Amino acid sequence: MIRTVFITLFWVILTATPSFAQTTPEEYRAREIGAQLRCVVCQNQSIEESDAKLAEDMRLAVREQVAAGASNDAVIAYMRDNYGDYVLLKPPVQTNTYVLWFLPAGLVFFGLLWFGLWPRRKIQVVEENAPLTPQDQALLDDLMRDDT
């Protein structure tokens, strides 16, 4: 009897715990914003994915801004002001990022253009039974004498 009560109580506690762990809308917003921001220490990881101490501080700053009632754009602008454009995982198209955005497409375009317009080398077709020139015949005779 006590064993049954213990197992039932254990099962209720085990299945009821996830209902206590609810994420607030502010936390969802903070995670959404954090997924758009790059950890400035790590290699192309968002601050939500990174384990770096600086990423932890950045997550805290985002959550403080969200708790203060700032909009998503205002929080991103705040982080951008503090850490620069590098903090954005998707950098904006602006004059200092034109090379970043358009160079790959330009290289592909000009590469295809160069490859398509480059004149093909003409392959000289030599007839099978064409007579040898006197110089070629002399060279062939010298080579044949050296082999034997």
Image: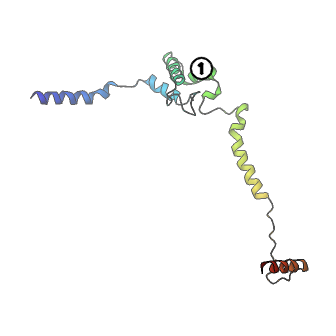
Looking at the image, which residue sits at the far right? 134
The image quadrant of residue 126 is bottom right
* Residue 2 rendering spot, x and y as whole percentages: 11, 27
The residue that appears at 21% across and 30% down in the rendered structure is 11
Q: Quadrant of residue 134?
A: bottom right
Crowding at label 1, few (<14), some or many (≥20) Cα neighbours within 10 Å? Answer: some
> Which residue is located at x 72 percent, y 49 percent?
109
Q: How many marks?
A: 1
Q: Residue at x 83, y 79 (%)?
A: 140
Query: Which residue type carries mark 1?
Result: Tyr
Residue 70, image quadrant: top right
Q: Residue furthest left?
A: 1
Farthest top residue?
68
Question: Nearest the camera: 93 or 103?
Answer: 103
In terms of secondary structure, where does tag 1 sit? helix
The residue that disc 1 covers is 78
- Give the image's coloring scheme: rainbow
Q: Is residue 101 above or below residue 40?
A: below
Using the image, determine if residue 115 lies above or below residue 139: above
**In the rendered view, does 22 fall on the left or right side of 50?**
left
User: Where residue 1 sits in the image (x, y, percent)?
Assistant: 9, 29
Horizontal relation, residue 110 to residue 2: left or right: right
Q: Position of residue 5 (x, y in %)?
A: 14, 27
Residue 125 drawn at (x, y percent): 80, 75
The quarter of the rendered structure image containing the C terminus is bottom right
